Image: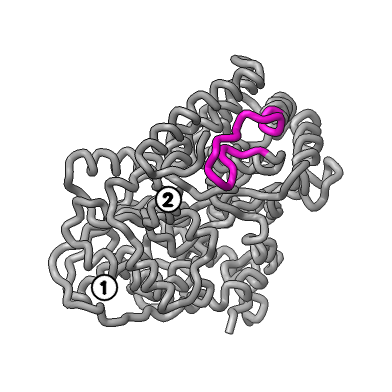
């Protein structure tokens, strides 16, 4: 049964939301390092640090590992943008270790430094046994364990893996799963309804043309800019790809041939220049992964392309902004209506890992309990195996974490229809992984938007860098195509 705050007696809704805020603020402690507080696997027990003791979290499940396990398991992952997730995850992972006979250590670091940390550990030949990142790690394929066995086992247990996740973890040229992808996160538009209503778009923008028209009017007349980054960080990479695809452009075609230099790309770059000039400031050239979140929460942005994390934080930090924040699907362009997944969970086991068996068993245990991951991320994390979160649709229709109206997140119910992988229309191969890591696409947009280059030169320079990367990986047999 889904909990409905409206059924409470003796408590006004405002008091209930205040209670949620206080409980969630308590959950924000211990965002980094290994957490040992709270009741593992629950939010309703004594000592809870979950979002609300009035809400019933899914029960933790345990299945005996296929083989006897021992030793240490060192896990590295990002500090989640919804802190309640990490408050749950750390003691839950350690509880599994105690049951399975493994000493589990969990380390969290800023998401922006994880790729560099992976490179350093691979170079040193030592470090963590299991690492999670929020974008495809295909560029590390030569240095990681093949995850085919654990992926096949997950499919055997829980049915077909989403194609979106498979194409973000599997290299068809080598038949190797360079990562295991048990989940993903949609990337809707987050907009301030009051601002867009004043500009004549009460339901927010639905097309890139409306984004330009309405966003420019809001900036000119209400003094509030929008926040689509053109910086060397993950959100800027996702937004740039969404714009390319919507205009009919892409980095590669479905056969992994480079096709970035096209009229469609030029049109997208020209559009981004117009969007910057009409609706943004130079701040977007120095964006980091938290900038659009922080700007929306502070009431300083009219629209961002992001997950629901900024909204969840504003429920605590700025309820007035939270009440005014709504969501829209991918914007329609001249050719398509697509965005990349905001987060694509890639779990990798580096070749230097000392406890591969425990790492694989933990991933299966994590997938078994993905309903808990979704819940404790406050519906941020979506499953790659749909049956693992059977109530997700119900939760989105009636948000158990206090949305007003309760169906505010319902737009995410069909997010798969407008979401794709970062290599679209091809796979997320090592070349696209490197291009993502080097932020070549947002650099292309920024060069033209700042006026440092003409749109034509920005596209030509991007093509030169991209072709060199594809050639390198193709010569190593890890990328297909011919050009």
Can residue 365 be seen here? yes
Q: Position of residue 10 (x, y in %)?
A: 62, 80
Furthest-left residue in this view: 71
Residue 473 badge: none
Residue wearing tag 1? 95
Q: Residue 294, can we see it? A: no
Q: CA distance from mark 2 to mark 1?
A: 39 Å
**Colouring chosen for the image of the structure:** one colour
Residue 62 drawn in magenta: no
- Dots 2, 1 in contact, CB < 8 A: no
Residue position marked by numbered label 2 in the rendering: 173
First reached walking from the N terminus: tag 2 or tag 1: 1
Q: Which residue is the extreme one toward the front?
A: 482
Q: Secondary structure at mark 1?
A: helix
Q: Which residues are magenta?
A: 249-266
Above or below for 217 versus 168? above
In depth, the one of 39 and 246 nearer the eye is 246
Give the residue furthest to the right: 200
Q: Nearer the viewer, mark 2 or mark 1?
A: 2
For image coordinates 48% across by 26% down, the residue present is: 465
The spot of residue 12 in percent (x, y) is 65, 72
Choose top left, top right, bottom left or bottom right for residue 42.
bottom left
Q: Position of residue 408 (x, y in %)?
A: 69, 63
- Residue at the image position 29 percent from the left and 44 percent from the top: 118
Q: Main secondary structure of the magenta part?
A: loop
259 falls in the magenta region = yes
Residue 477 location, quadrant: top left
């Amino acid at each position: 049964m889904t909990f409905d705050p409206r059924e409470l007696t003796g408590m006004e809704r405002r008091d209930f939301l205040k209670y949620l805020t206080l409980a969630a603020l308590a959950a924000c402690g211990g965002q980094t390092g290994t957490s040992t507080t709270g009741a593992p696997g629950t939010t309703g027990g004594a000592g809870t640090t979950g979002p609300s003791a009035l809400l019933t979290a899914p029960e933790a499940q345990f299945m005996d590992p296929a083989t006897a396990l021992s030793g240490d398991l060192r896990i590295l992952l990002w500090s989640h943008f919804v802190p309640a997730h990490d408050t749950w995850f750390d003691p839950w992972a350690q509880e599994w270790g105690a049951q399975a006979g493994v000493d589990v250590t969990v380390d969290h670091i800023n998401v922006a430094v994880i790729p560099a940390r992976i490179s350093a550990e691979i170079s040193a030949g030592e470090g963590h046994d299991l690492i999670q990142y929020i974008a495809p790690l295909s560029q590390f394929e030569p240095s990681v364990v093949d995850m085919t066995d654990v992926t096949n086992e997950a499919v055997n247990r829980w049915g077909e893996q989403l194609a979106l996740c498979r194409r973000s973890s599997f290299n068809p040229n080598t038949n190797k799963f360079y990562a295991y992808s048990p989940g993903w996160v949609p990337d809707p538009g987050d907009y301030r309804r009051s601002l867009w209503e004043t500009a004549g778009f009460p339901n927010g923008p639905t097309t890139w043309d409306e984004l330009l028209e309405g966003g420019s009017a809001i900036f000119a007349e209400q003094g509030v800019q929008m926040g689509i980054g053109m910086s060397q960080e993950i959100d800027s990479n996702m937004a740039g790809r969404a714009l390319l695809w919507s205009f009919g452009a892409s980095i590669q075609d479905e056969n992994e041939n480079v096709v970035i230099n096209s009229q469609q790309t030029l049109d997208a770059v020209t559009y981004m220049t117009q969007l910057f000039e009409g609706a943004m400031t130079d701040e977007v050239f120095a964006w980091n992964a938290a900038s659009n979140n922080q700007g929306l929460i502070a009431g300083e942005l009219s629209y961002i392309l992001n997950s629901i994390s900024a909204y969840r934080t504003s429920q605590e930090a700025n309820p007035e902004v939270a009440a005014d924040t709504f969501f829209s699907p991918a914007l329609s362009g001249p050719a398509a209506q697509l965005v990349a997944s905001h987060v694509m969970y890639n779990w990798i086991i580096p070749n230097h890992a000392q406890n591969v068996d425990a790492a694989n068993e933990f991933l299966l245990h994590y997938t078994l309990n993905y309903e808990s991951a979704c819940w404790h991320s406050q519906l941020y994390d979506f499953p790659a195996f749909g049956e693992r979160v059977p109530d997700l649709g119900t939760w989105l229709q009636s948000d158990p974490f206090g949305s007003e109206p309760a169906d505010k997140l319902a737009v995410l119910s069909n997010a798969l229809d407008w979401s794709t992988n970062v290599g679209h229309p091809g796979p997320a191969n090592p070349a696209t992984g490197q291009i993502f890591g080097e932020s070549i696409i947002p650099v292309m947009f920024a060069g033209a938007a700042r006026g440092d280059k003409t749109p034509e030169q920005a596209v030509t320079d991007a093509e030169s860098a991209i072709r060199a990367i594809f050639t390198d990986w193709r010569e190593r047999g890890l990328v297909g195509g011919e050009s």
